[in-house]
């Protein structure tokens, strides 16, 4: 989604915010992002429990698929028909704040409430000293590997570097499987590239605020992935596979290694319980650098809400230890609540421990206007490189120029 385009429509519709239909007294409307088949049932239970504990307040929620969520919010905000609360990608928050549609929550947040959170996950929603959102979901990325394929290929342990990963992928290929699952389309295609880029010591943005795509490290990362495709170390048709496609190949036992989020562990337990797998750190680069992608989604309150006090009561309820545990464990995320993180479920979970160990190396999407447009520019460049329709250096220079154009707006 191109935020630069939707903000124009948002600005045009700001005057319509006041035209929103009057909210029913005591009704809190919530736009919910759909994470899995468990999302709707969880919020149905929230409605039941919260209404029982808070007579006079009713919850009305709508579950919306992620791929249409931003467009729906844009349309609703422009028409002044948006809900009181909504789950959003935290990377969208700066645009909501700049357009003055997000309500600061600091007037409701007590020191005790703030202390519930692991600070790493709360910080992305704080802008210019004001808290505009709460981390409803959090995750990082790590490398999954198929233990049976490793054993057949004579691989003793997961690779520590990208060079070792290539060597292991060759051994797995020789056994008739795909060595490394590489995503090539849709959401987080750019992120899959950043794993290799960060390992080269390169950042998405240079220190002067310009794009890092034209740096030597960015080029080396692109060449690495392209060489693996050309050598047949990845699955065929990389640009036809999104994150779910690669995860499905892994669950089917066809891929030796792939990088993704904690929720794959839950999917494996439910859909492929006999699959023997492990979770390890993302490989390091030549100087030992490595990076994982830290992600938060936030729940925000809209400024034009007519029932802010009731909406806050729901937020307070959602961020209790008990509710956090139900949601986080059901969806397969990392805990954002300190007390929740102490629960045996997390302390004794080897998969989640691998993700948690990577958090010191986590990078979050830059909090800048137009980030979604820059992410799409990067994804488009990687697709051209993977397909062989553009040379890596030329594609990256072109992408950097386009990204810099967005950054200057």
Image (cartoon, grey):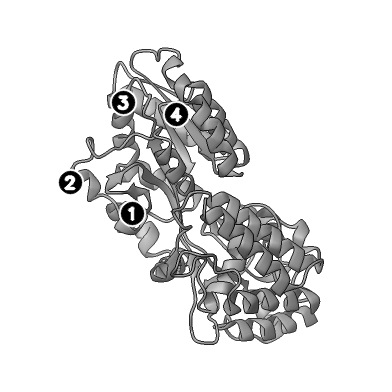
Mark nearer the viewer, 4 or 1: 1
Q: Quadrant of residue 108?
A: top left
Real-space Cα separation, disc 3 to disc 1, in angstroms: 22 Å
Query: For this rendering, which residue is in front, 11 or 286?
Result: 11
Task: Tell me if mark 4 has few (under 14), some (14-19) or many (20+) residues whose alpha carbon lies within 10 angstroms of its own.
Answer: many
Looking at marks 3 and 1 on the same chain, the residue that comes earlier in the sequence is marked by 1
Which type of secondary structure does the marked residue at label 3 adopt? helix
Which residue has dot 2 on it? 111
Query: From this viewpoint, is residue 179 visible?
Result: no
Query: From this viewpoint, is residue 348 visible?
Result: yes
Left or right: residue 181 compared with residue 192: right
Which residue has dot 3 on it? 308
Looking at marks 4 and 1 on the same chain, the residue that comes earlier in the sequence is marked by 4
Q: Measuring 52% from the left and 74% from the top, which residue is drawn there?
A: 202
Which type of secondary structure does the marked residue at label 4 adopt? strand
Q: Which mark is residue 30?
A: 4
Q: Position of residue 20 (x, y in %)?
A: 45, 16
Real-space Cα separation, disc 3 to disc 4, in angstroms: 12 Å
Which type of secondary structure does the marked residue at label 2 adopt? helix
């Amino acid at each position: 989604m191109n935020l630069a385009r939707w903000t124009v429509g948002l600005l045009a519709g700001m005057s319509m915010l006041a035209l929103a239909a009057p909210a029913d007294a005591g009704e809190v409307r919530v736009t919910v992002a759909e994470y899995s088949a468990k999302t709707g049932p969880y919020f149905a239970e929230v409605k039941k429990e919260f209404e029982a504990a808070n007579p006079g307040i009713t919850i009305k929620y709508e579950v919306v698929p992620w791929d249409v969520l931003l467009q729906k919010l844009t349309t609703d905000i422009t028409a002044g028909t948006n809900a009181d609360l909504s789950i959003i990608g935290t990377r969208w928050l700066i645009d909501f704040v700049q357009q003055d549609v997000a309500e600061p929550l600091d007037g409701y947040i007590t020191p005790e409430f703030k202390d519930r959170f692991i600070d790493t996950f709360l910080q992305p929603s704080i802008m210019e000293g004001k808290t505009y959102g709460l981390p409803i979901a959090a995750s990082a990325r790590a490398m999954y590997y198929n233990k049976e394929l490793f054993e057949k290929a004579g691989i003793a342990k997961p690779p520590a570097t990208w060079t070792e990963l290539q060597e292991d992928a060759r051994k797995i290929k020789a056994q008739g499987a795909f060595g490394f699952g590489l995503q090539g389309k849709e959401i987080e295609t750019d992120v899959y590239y950043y794993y290799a880029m960060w390992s080269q010591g390169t950042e998405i943005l240079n220190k002067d605020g310009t794009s890092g795509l034209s740096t030597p490290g960015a080029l080396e990362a692109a060449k690495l992935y392209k060489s693996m495709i050309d050598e047949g170390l990845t699955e065929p048709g990389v640009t036809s596979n999104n994150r779910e496609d690669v995860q499905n190949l892994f669950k089917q036992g066809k891929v030796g290694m792939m990088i993704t989020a904690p929720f794959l562990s839950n999917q494996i337990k439910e859909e492929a319980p006999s699959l023997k797998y492990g979770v390890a750190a993302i490989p390091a680069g030549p100087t030992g650098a490595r990076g994982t992608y830290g992600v938060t989604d936030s729940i925000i309150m809209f400024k034009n809400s007519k029932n802010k006090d009731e909406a806050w009561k729901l937020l307070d309820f959602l961020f209790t230890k008990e509710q956090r545990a139900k949601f986080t464990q059901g969806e397969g995320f990392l805990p954002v609540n300190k007390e929740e993180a102490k629960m045996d479920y997390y302390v004794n979970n080897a998969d989640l421990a691998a993700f948690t160990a990577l958090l010191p190396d986590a990078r979050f999407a830059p909090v800048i206007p137009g980030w979604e447009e820059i992410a799409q520019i990067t994804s488009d460049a990687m697709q051209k490189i993977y397909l062989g329709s553009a040379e890596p250096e030329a594609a990256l220079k072109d992408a950097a120029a386009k990204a810099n154009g967005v950054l200057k707006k």
